[in-house]
Image (spheres, grey):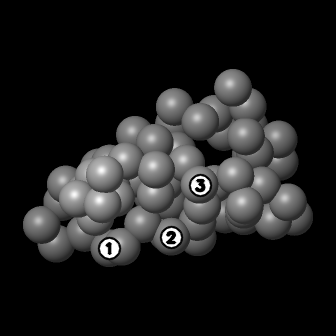
Amino acid sequence: MLICSCNVLSDKQLREAAAEMRDDPNGKIPTPGSVFRHLGCRPRCGGCFPSVIDIIHENTPENEKLK
């Protein structure tokens, strides 16, 4: 599903980028801006940020502990 129409980014791409960042021992905390940079682009209008935030944090280890 297309999440960011400005950069043509799908939910799958965003999830994979966030997972790669979390799995990297020297990686950064996945934030919308850092995930966009990881994918080689930058946020433009920011209208997708609420959805991006939900996607990149939906399967974090911290959230799994809360279940």
Considering every residue shown, the one lying at the far front of the view is 67
Q: Which residue is mark 2?
A: 31
Above or below 24: residue 1: above
Residue at the (52%, 31%) spot, across then down = 12
Quadrant hosting residue 30: bottom left
Amino acid carrying label 1: it is: Lys
Picture coordinates of residue 38, whole percent (x, y): 45, 58
- Does residue 44 appear to the left or right of 62 in the view shown? right
- Residues at discs 1 and 3 in contact (Cβ within 8 Å): no
Residue at the (46%, 57%) spot, across then down = 57
- Does residue 64 appear to the left or right of 16 in the view shown? left
Amino acid carrying label 3: it is: Asp
Which numbered disc, 3 or 2, marks the residue that appears first in the sequence?
Answer: 2
- As helix, strand or loop, the secondary structure at mark 1 comes to loop
| Labels 3, 2: front one | 3
Above or below 33: residue 57: above
Q: How far is disc 1 from disc 3 in space, using C-alphas?
A: 17 Å
> What label does residue 28 carry, if any?
1
- As helix, strand or loop, the secondary structure at mark 2 comes to loop
